Image (tube, rainbow, N blue to C red):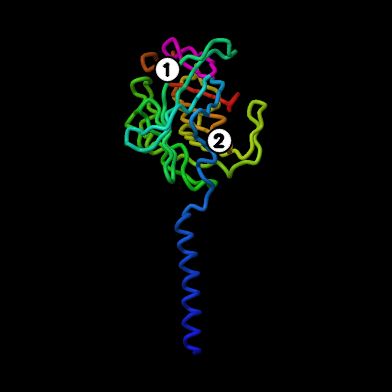
Amino acid sequence: MRRFTSFITTLFILAIFCFSACKKQSDPFNSEALSDYLPLETGKYITYRLDSIVFLNFGKKQELHSYQVKYEVDAQVTDNLGRPAYRIFRYIRDTAGIQSWAPDNTFYITPLESQIEYTENNLRFIKLHLPIKDGFSWKGNTYMPDEPYASLFDFQNDNNIQDWDYFYDGDPEPSVTINDQTYTDVLSVKYDEIPDANLTDTIPMTEPFVVERSYSMEKYSKSIGLVYREYTMWDHQPNPTQGGGNDPYTNGFSIKMWMIDHN
């Protein structure tokens, strides 16, 4: 009888151990859900103010263009790999909001078990990835082609774009204020490359030395979605046709956008 009781006790302990192990396997990341920070449903929209810096006059003049843009979830569809996804329409108008919205572009968001993919102009980014944990990193541009911006910009910033390490810059912050709007539970995703000691936050236009900047920052507020974005890729070059690096030029782009409205 004593042996039988001992045998039953052993089986009970093993059952608890197996249940605990299975539970851990079913939640390998022990993390909040990605959908908490990028909720998707048909009809949801977010409106942003968008500031875009462009370089004109063969890279010798810097100009700021500003707009309002609205991203709206249009419908559930399948992406080009046959996976369930959401189609996103983007509309654009003037910064004062006087003009009517004009269709501008179409994007796709594909939520997967451990990551969320975003396809823009046939470029596929991994925007979020499990686990949501300070310092966790992943190759956010792993699906990008070689030099994806070569048809638009004559720079070297995208030569190794598949190797970019995106990472969570801290745990979700309880409260963050962006342009006088306060958000709760804000998750920051960052890529930052500083390849040159001459780098400053100001875009150079006259310095006779090489400077380049590649930087990405996105902030997601829980239950809302993306509330802030920066995306910068430019390089500044001395003109090799001019002695001593005279007549330098800058090539690339820089955008900032922040939420002004949502439903």
As measured in the structure, the alpha-carbon distance from the residue carrying label 1 to the one carrying label 2 is 46 Å
State the SS at label 1. Answer: helix
Element marked by disc 2 = strand
In the displayed structure, 195 sits above or below 20; it is above
Q: Which is nearer the eye, 107 or 181?
A: 107
Q: Is residue 140 magenta?
A: no
Seen at 37% across and 36% down, the residue is 162
- Residue drawn where x is 63% and y is 29% of the image: 178
Question: On the image, which quarter does residue 36 sit in?
Answer: top right
Query: Left or right: where does residue 31 sit relative to residue 108?
Result: right
Name the amino acid, label 2.
Tyr
Please determine whether, in this image, residue 46 is positioned above or below residue 187: above
Tell me the crowding category of disc 1: few under 14, some 14 to 19, or many 20 or more residues within 10 angstroms, Cα based: few
Give the x, y percent position of residue 50. 54, 20
Query: 33 and 159: which one is in front?
Result: 33
* Marks 1 & 2, CB-CB < 8 Å contact: no
Q: Position of residue 98 (x, y in %)?
A: 58, 10
Q: Residues within 10 Å of mark 2 (few under 14, many from 20)?
A: many
Res 244 label: 1
**Label ID, residue 220:** 2
Q: Residue furthest bottom?
A: 1
Relative image position of residue 229 (x, y in whole percent): 53, 29
**Main SS type for the magenta part?**
strand
Q: Please, what is the three-letter code of the amino acid marked with disc 1? A: Gly
Segment tinted magenta in the rendering? 51-68
Rendered position, 97 above or below 195: above
x, y percentage for residue 81?
A: 32, 36
Earlier-in-chain disc, 1 versus 2:
2
Instruction: Please give the name of the residue rendered at 49% of the width and 48% of the height, measured from the top-left corner.
Output: 131
